[in-house]
Amino acid sequence: MTAISEAVILMAGSGSRLRESDNSILKPLVPVLGRPLICYTMDALVRAGIKKLNIVVGYESERLSAEVRQLAAPGLALSFIHNPDWQKQNGVSVLAAAKSVDAHFLLTMSDHLFDQSIVDLLIREASADRLNLAIDRKLDSIFDIDDAMKVQTHRDRITAIGKNLETYDAIDTGLFVCPPEFFAYLERAKRNGDCSLADGVRSMAAEGKARVIDIGAAWWQDIDTPDMLEHVESEMRALKEPRVSRG
């Protein structure tokens, strides 16, 4: 398929689970080893060839937009899209970007960290006529499996997705390459004006149009709580340590 040059980043929520009672800092700006969380995502996307970020904001949108604009790399185009219904599920935030994107796009969350290799792999292996989801089959490595978005697959097809699945063989990493038609599936999945991202994936999967790409040994982590933040910083420090042979 043709190169992916645009991404949609979801950062409309309040992030209250991570911030707890501290309203002075916004979730995408929470320091991770001294750098704002969102900087890691933006750097990875730029290195993967993304030229424009469509950033869906909601909670404290003006303050967040101003801060993120200051952090962006020179030459990276930013489009901030306000979702007035940011308190609804994340599918509504994806739909807020529908009028801004008319080609295949990379979709990710502002609170997920991932190896550069995952972004590169997903873009390289994406199928133009499918929704493509990067999944992790290393179930034992998931920090909070109860909170994880679980995926059931058959070969490279998604057969079920949801946090409460009893049978599953993979975890959704929150990184997608989407065709423009994904917006229509999300719209059809809405109930009472609301839908989740998983609802849209489920809708495409029902027609055999959602596939997975296995990240293999690569590393990623979402950050929803202080415990997750502590865990991710510990893992990142370990990844940076030189591997010295002993013996």
Image (spheres, rainbow, N blue to C red):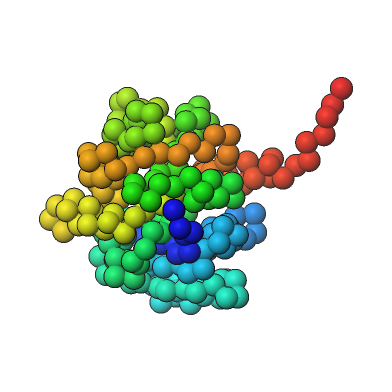
Pick the residue in front: 25 or 202. 202
Work out whether residue 164 or residue 102 is closer to the camera in this orientation and state it: 102
Q: Quadrant of residue 98?
A: bottom left
Q: Please count the marks in the image.
A: 0
Q: Residue 50, can we see it?
A: yes
Going 47% across and 54% down the picture, which residue do you hit?
A: 111
Going 35% across and 67% down the picture, which residue do you hit?
101
- Tell which residue pokes out farthest to the right in this image: 247
From the image, which quarter does the C terminus lie in? Answer: top right
Look at 34% across and 47% down and name the residue there: 130
Residue 109 visible in the current orientation: no
**Residue situated in front as seen by the camera: 131 or 38:** 131
| 70 over 123 or under it: above or below | below
* Rendered location of residue 176, percent (x, y): 41, 50
Q: Position of residue 183 (x, y in %)?
A: 26, 58
Q: Where residue 9 sits in the image (x, y, percent)? A: 42, 61
Q: Is residue 191 left or right of residue 73?
A: left
Q: Residue at 41% across / 67% down in the picture?
A: 55
